[in-house]
Amino acid sequence: MTDTLTAPPEVPEQEPLGSIEEPLWRVRLRLTKRSLVQNWKLFVANRIGLVGLVMIVIFALMAIAHPILMATVWPSQIYHPINGYDAPVSEKLVVEEVTDPVTEVDLTTARIQYGPFTEIGETVSISQQPAPPSFGGPNPHYLGTDPLGRDVLSQLLYSTRSAFFLGLIAAMVTVVFATVVGSVAAFFGGWVDSVLMRLADLILLVPLLPVLIVVSALFRISLPLLGLLIGILSGFGGTAIILKSQALQVTVKPFLDAARIAGGGNGHLILRHVIPNVLPLSFLYMMFTVTDAIALEATLSFLGLLSIPMSWGIMISIARTQGYLLGSLEYWWLLVPAGLAVSLLAAAFFLVGRAMDEVVNPRLRQR
Amino acid sequence: MLKYVAKRLIQGLLLLMLFLALLYILLDAQPGDISLQLSANPRLPPEAQEIVRERLGLDQPLLGRTVTYVLNFFQGDLGLSFTQYPRTVGSVILEKLPRTILLFLSATILAYYMGFALGKVMAWRRGKTVETGLTLGGVAAYTVFYPWFAILMLWFWGFQFGLFPLGKFIDVDEWTGAPMAANRVFMRMLISLGILGLVLGAVSLLAHRLPPERGEQVARYGPPLVLVAFLAFWWLSPLRSYVADIAHHTLLPVLTLASVQFAGVMLLTRASMLETLKEDYILTARAKGLPQRDIRNRHAARNALLPVVTSLVLALSFVIGGGILTEGIFSWPGIGGQLLDATLTEDIPLATGTLGVIGIIALVGHLISDVLYMYLDPRIRTS
């Protein structure tokens, strides 16, 4: 790891930049490819970033797997993440003192759940919700079922897709807002700058979670709308301020003057010269926005404030509202998979962001 | 310096007004208004409904109502709570605010202290096992799904080991026959903690002003002595068991909130230290042959502190969000928990009122970190 870092990043053989006959787009393509290869090497040098990337790929595969599984092996009425229902039946021995809740049941429960004339010593088949993980039978539930008899694994995979969907919306909105606001403020300066930056200050100042909590009490918030809100609030707030300072460094560069002298208008200068130069940093902060968006969505749906049919936060919320919280080791499958999924996906994007930080920001590199 | 603070204060006030105005406009944008609820009675003639609207001022244009709302807010009139009907929003918030302040303040101070101390070590030992371990732990704590983490903490320490109570603020059984209300005891605790902080600050200031040998002695023996005196004061007071009960309930939420917050501070301190360590004056200090510890603590860490203090502003949103969830999960009766309750029961005046007060907390935090920054950076202080 250190070896690749101590040596300056290997620059591939300097190819000639192309003769006049070569079309411009091909030259651009080659330059882009070269910088991509270089940055990839820097990125890979940091193992932690690679771990994050692998984790994101695994989650993406999970998201893709769900519709395929639903179409092939999982019958919809049992495995549907929202409407599915199954109550796995297990044989239990009726005993006086329960020592092993998986195979034994006490008399009172057995009489309620099986029949009023059950006696101690009999074996009864009791259907269970939530059911622990089961691997055999016609309908195995690898992560058990939730208190409403729905398959936890199916919910987990289904929620992965919506988490990615939300992250994507929030990230794209952030990038667009932050780059445009930052570039415009830096480029024009003056009152445009003051207005935009004071607005950004205000948004930065307002704590995101309580505002979203109150907003969700006033309006119905769906997943795309939440993504839009998070994207705007984080893109127009802190990220725009950081990108503006980056764009300010670009606006004083000589190539901008050259472009202006060559007759470029303001729109051209911003689009072709300022924005491409702040875009890498913008993508970096996009990663952190995704982390925030995933955590925020999970938090809000954990509190039961969003109108979303299913998500990781809702899975934990159900376990909580149905009262399975403090027996958490006994009912681990209700709490642990969803909680881990939120934490791991958020961590994965955060790690990738950190590794990208070292690529974009040379001061952080070792030596 | 005073001028700078005053300028900041005025800016903050303007921002607060803007925030409140936006809050009211948001409130206004929701479908329907309170007059529809009050005049839902079908036997009420239209003229009477009109009178209700007029009495509530809802016939005014949006701008006028917004101005009224902001002015009322500054006069402390936040309206009536729906769910706790005869009480005003202001009195509910006043009752709960001290507890929230204690939670936020102690968790933040603890988190910054720990995070800075550990981040320093991390940067200093770059590439060692210590750093990798701390990074992994830090990233895990930073990105963990907070409500889930808090629930696990509550389950592990409170339920499994029974070391801490399962939420709430006092144990009601122990308070029967208490000489005064829990809130008054709590206020006294808060005041004594404030005095403790001031005395500790004075001691460290004294340690800096005195000649080095004496100063070092003061720095070493002063703080523990003050702490012992503080504990002895409460130990000897007649309210001992009640104070201990409140403290017992406070500890777990504070530790949970701090353990998530400190990760961000730690990771940031590391990055900031790494940049500082590349500066020429560190090389100079090394060349002079100064002891490693002095280079780390006096030359590198003190300069690395600046960006960390700035991050206080950026982290504020994170802290407040975490604080609200903490209050919700630990049933801590502060304004964050109140915000959640009010939202879930659609007590709109209470929800917006608490949000406004949370905005003020954010503003004050902003101001404090600005002043701290100025104090730490002599380039700003003298100009």
Image (tube, helix red, strand yellow):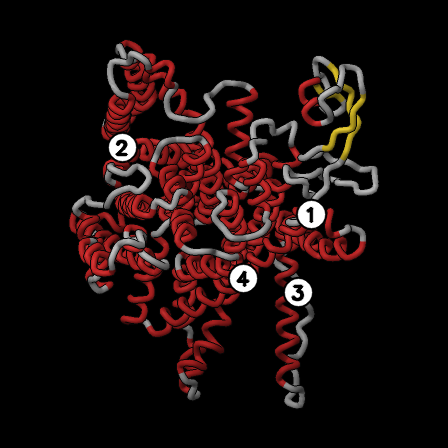
Q: CA distance from mark 4 to mark 1?
A: 28 Å
Depth-wise, is mark 3 or mark 4 nearer the camera? 4
Q: CA distance from mark 1 to mark 2?
A: 46 Å
Q: Give the residue type at disc 4.
A: Ile
Q: Count residues near mark 4 (Cα–Cα under 10 Å), then give few for <14, some for 14-19, many for 20+.
A: many
Residue B13 location, x and y as percent?
Answer: 21, 52
Residue B59 location, x and y as percent?
Answer: 21, 61
Q: Count residues near mark 1 (Cα–Cα under 10 Å), then give few for <14, some for 14-19, many for 20+.
A: some
Residue at which label 4 appears: A169
Residue A177 location, x and y as percent?
Answer: 44, 66
**Could you say which disc has been placed on residue A241 in the image?**
none
Q: Give the residue type at disc 1.
A: Gly
Residue lying at 52% horizontally and 50% vertically, measured from the top left: A297
Of all chains, the one bearing label 2 is B
Q: Give the residue type at disc 2.
A: Glu
The reply to whether dot 1 and dot 2 touch (C-beta < 8 Å) is no
Element assignment for label 4? helix
Residue lying at 73% horizontally and 32% vertically, measured from the top left: A127
Of all chains, the one bearing label 1 is A
Of all chains, the one bearing label 3 is A
Residue A34 location, x and y as percent?
Answer: 65, 69
Q: Nearer the viewer, residue A61 or A194?
A: A61
Residue at which label 3 appears: A37
Q: Is residue B274 above or below residue B175?
A: below
The reply to whether dot 4 and dot 1 touch (C-beta < 8 Å) is no
Residue at which label 2 appears: B95
Residue A26 showing in the rendered view: yes
Residue lying at 69% horizontally and 39% vertically, measured from the top left: A145
Q: Nearer the viewer, residue A201 or B244?
A: B244
Q: Count residues near mark 2 (Cα–Cα under 10 Å), then give few for <14, some for 14-19, many for 20+.
A: few
Q: CA distance from mark 2 to mark 4?
A: 41 Å
